[in-house]
Amino acid sequence: MKPIWARLFAALALIVPRVALAGAPCETITFEDTPFSVCTVQAGQDLRLWLKDGSGAIIGTFERVKATLGAGERLVFAMNAGMYSPDRTPAGLYVENGEELHGIVTKEGPGNFGMVPNGVFCVSDRFAVIESRTFAAHPLACRYATQSGPMLVIDGALHPRFLPESDSSYIRNGVGVSADGQKASFVISDRAVNFHTFARFFRDVLHTPNALYLDGSISRLTVPAQGRADFGLPMGPIVGLVAHD
């Protein structure tokens, strides 16, 4: 059974008013009666990851992300960016501004993160979602990277452990990358879904050959210009798009 806090969060997510995500870079796409919010980033845009501020404190909230921005910079959207430990440090690989702050984890383990194959989302001059052991054997030079799991779509196939009839449903978020690496699609389900449905959205609707689960239950999105600001407990890594006015 889901913990009480997870059930309450899922219920509140259904009743809290949300502004329809219409227009660039975010939109709402309905798949099998479930709305999914999709925020799209093109290679070359200023996509960043945030973990700690200048004092070494975990940033953890969208408002504190905004506070890190410089003059003329504006947060377009942001969401939680992968699994983390109770102290909110990354569970696996984490790279920020080209610096590796936490190493990659390749062993199988408990929970969703350890449901191998898991993967790495990498930002360089293009985007990539790569299975973790493949990445460890042939690492890329990433400006930003976050490891999470499980993989949702692996070379066009769903993760082998996903079951269509699973009753494990949560608000979930993830990222998929186009075949040419020029586009990354960040998605949050606006209703609770199981892994199988969430993964099929990436494969069958967005047509991303590789996609990575970022988290569930705590999944949150903010789109300031459209009035969306999901609430919840402080997070670990955060990913977001910055515009330059």
Image (spheres, rainbow, N blue to C red):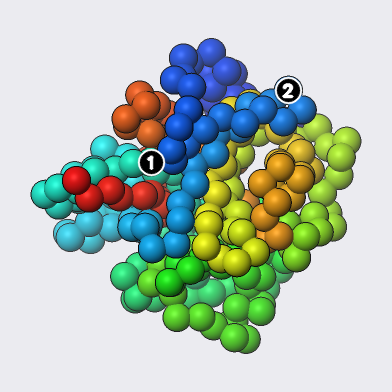
Circle 1: residue type: Phe
Residue at horizontal 48 percent and vertical 22 percent from the top: 20
Circle 2: residue type: Asp
Residue 117, quarter of the rendered image: bottom right
Pointer 2 residue: 33
Give the crowd class for mark 2: few <14, some 14-19, many >=20 residues within 10 Å: few
Pointer 1 residue: 77
241 left or right, relative to 93: left
Does residue 210 appear in the picture of this structure? yes
Residue 15 spot, x, y in % from top left: 53, 13
Residue 193 spot, x, y in % from top left: 71, 33
Considering every residue shown, the one lying at the far left of the view is 71
**Label 2 residue SS:** loop
Residue 195 vertical placement versus 111 (above, below): above
Residue 183 spot, x, y in % from top left: 53, 57
Residue 217, quarter of the rendered image: top right
